[in-house]
Image (cartoon, rainbow, N blue to C red):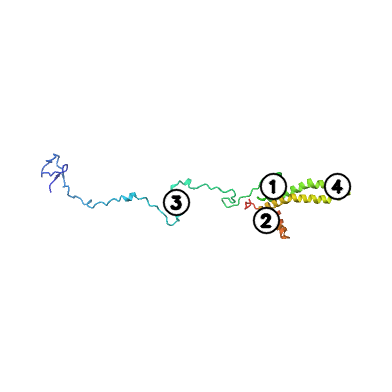
Amino acid sequence: MGSFCAFCGKPIIEGANFCVACGKPVAVSPAPNQNTSTLFTEPAPPINNNVYSQPPQQIINNSVPVVQNAQYAQNQMVPQQYTNPVYQAPNNANLYANNQPAPYVPNEITLVGLVFNYFFGGFSGRCRLLELWLTAFMLLFLQTLFIGIPCGAAFYYFRDNPQIMQYMPYAAYAINIVLTLINFLPSIMMTTRRLHDLDFSGWWQLFFYVPVFGWLFMLYVIFCPGDKGHNRYG
């Protein structure tokens, strides 16, 4: 095989030091169609352009439910500080974070509050044992001050007058009836709230009229403290 010029590719005369065609110094190179190496004899594999146009595959862990996979994907897209909403306990929540009952804090007890709650407290809410006893002593004091003392003074002053003394029993009955009518509805309301404090319905006060068992239940309501934590009535 003859030699060819490395610059223009023309055949070079054997023994010549310059190319006749271009005048460049002779640099011998193999013929263009001659394969000098077998490293690149195999054709390169074709490039699959569709691989780069496909969306990335979603990695799904089959060992956990689909809901957790969706939650995991959402947490990866949204910053972590925005994925945990602030939990607000409802106003009537009965439990702390350690599953301990929240203590029930009653309203402050005052003389005006006792009178108002007794007559206008209604059938909702709770009545603590201390409020029950303080209300009872308050009513006893008021009845003694405005009824007992005047009636005792009248009896002492008119004890020698038989015409007036014969009407004293009727006056006592009338005062008793008036006091019963005044205290009828407030006593039912306070008893209902007292039963609520023990987590009982207000209809349980009808059980007071049952002989023996009703009386024992009444003693339980009068002397037993209520629930320390919240219940269904407050």
Label 4 crowd (10 A; few <14 / some 14-19 / many >=20): few
Q: Pointer 3: what residue?
A: 72
Question: Residue 66, image x and y in percent?
Answer: 44, 55
First in sequence: mark 4 or mark 1? 1
Image position of 69 (left or right of 32): right
Q: Nearer the viewer, mark 4 or mark 3?
A: 4
Q: CA distance from mark 4 to mark 1?
A: 37 Å
Residue 156 is labelled as 4
Residue kind at label 4, given as amino acid type: Tyr
Question: Residue 88, image x and y in percent?
Answer: 55, 47
First in sequence: mark 3 or mark 1? 3
Closer to the camera in the image, 95 or 191: 191
Closer to the camera in the image, 127 or 34: 127
Tag 2 near tag 4, CB within 8 Å:
no
First in sequence: mark 2 or mark 3? 3
Tag 2 near tag 3, CB within 8 Å:
no
First in sequence: mark 4 or mark 3? 3
Q: CA distance from mark 2 to mark 1?
A: 19 Å
Question: Residue 177, image x and y in percent?
Answer: 78, 51
Q: Nearer the viewer, mark 3 or mark 1?
A: 1
Residue kind at label 2, given as amino acid type: Trp
